[in-house]
C-alpha cells in the first residue's frame, strides 16, 4: 500500500494547465476592452475638436474643411480611417454646428486575426461664437 501523500502527485500541474490559458485569455480580453475604450475616448475628443474648429470657421464650406483638418490632426500617428459629416445649417451668429465623426480602428496590433477592426462613431455640437463668426 502506498502512503497517502503520493495520491496527489500531479494535481498542481493539472491545475496550472487548466487555469494558465484561461488567465491569458482573460488578460487579452481586458487589454482589448481597454483599447476599445481608449479609442472611443480619443474619437469623442476628435469630434469635440472638430466641432470647435467648425464653429470658429468663416462659413459653411470653411467649417467642413476645418472639421476634417481637426479630425486628421487628432488622428495623426494612428492607423484610423475617419470620415466627418458637418451639419452647419444653423451656422449663423448664435447658432450651432454639429460634427459627426466615424472612424474605423484596426485591431491587428492586438493579435486579433485577419484584419479585425472596430467602427467608432461620435458627434459633438458647438455654438457659433457671435463675435468670431462671419456675416450671417
Image (spheres, rainbow, N blue to C red):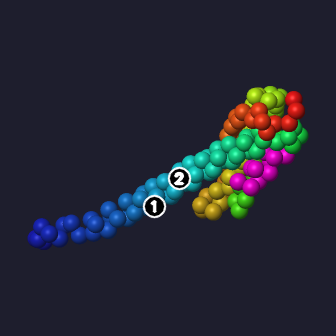
Residue that carries the numbered disc 1 in the rendered image: 24
Q: Say left or right for 111 vs 28.
A: right
Q: What residue sits 11% from the left and 71% below the top?
A: 3
* Quadrant assignment for the C terminus: top right
Local crowd size for mark 2, using a 10 Å CA cut-off: few (<14), some (14–19), many (≥20): few
Of residues 130 and 74, the one nearer the viewer is: 130
Select label 2 or label 1 by which is in front. 2
Q: Which mark is residue 34?
A: 2
Q: Quadrant of residue 14?
A: bottom left
Q: Residue at x 86, y 36 (%)?
A: 134
Q: Position of residue 100 (x, y in %)?
A: 74, 38
Q: Is residue 66 visible?
A: yes
Q: Residue at x 67, y 40 (%)?
A: 122
Quadrant location of residue 63? top right
CB-based contact (under 8 Å), mark 2 and mark 1: no
Q: Is residue 19 left or right of residue 65?
A: left
- Magenta span main SS: helix
Q: Position of residue 123 (x, y in %)?
A: 69, 37
Query: Where, quadrant-wise, is the N terminus in this rendering?
Result: bottom left
Provide residue 111's location: percent of width, then percent of height.
60, 62
Name the N-terminal-most of marks 2 and 1. 1
| Left or right: 102 as drawn, with respect to 18 | right
Q: Residues within 10 Å of mark 1 (few under 14, many from 20)?
A: few
In depth, the one of 11 and 96 nearer the eye is 96
Does 89 sit above or below residue 45?
above
Q: Tell me the SS state at disc 2.
A: helix
Q: Residue at x 78, y 36 (%)?
A: 131
Decide whether residue 122 is among the magenta residues: no
Cα–Cα gap, marks 2 and 1: 15 Å
User: Range of the magenta residues?
Assistant: 65-74
Circle 1 sits in a helix, a strand or a loop, which is it?
A: helix
Amino acid at each position: 500500500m502506498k502512503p497517502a501523500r503520493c495520491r496527489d502527485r500531479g494535481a498542481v500541474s493539472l491545475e496550472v494547465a487548466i487555469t494558465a490559458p484561461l488567465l491569458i485569455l482573460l488578460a487579452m480580453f481586458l487589454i482589448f476592452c481597454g483599447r476599445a475604450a481608449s479609442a472611443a475616448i480619443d474619437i469623442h475628443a476628435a469630434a469635440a475638436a472638430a466641432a470647435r474648429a467648425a464653429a470658429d470657421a468663416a462659413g459653411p464650406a470653411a467649417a467642413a474643411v476645418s472639421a476634417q483638418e481637426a479630425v486628421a490632426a487628432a488622428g495623426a500617428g494612428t492607423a484610423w480611417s475617419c470620415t466627418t459629416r458637418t451639419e452647419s445649417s444653423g451656422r449663423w451668429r448664435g447658432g450651432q454646428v454639429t460634427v459627426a465623426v466615424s472612424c474605423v480602428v484596426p485591431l491587428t496590433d492586438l493579435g486579433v486575426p485577419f484584419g479585425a477592426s472596430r467602427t467608432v462613431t461620435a458627434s459633438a455640437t458647438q455654438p457659433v461664437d457671435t463675435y468670431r463668426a462671419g456675416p450671417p
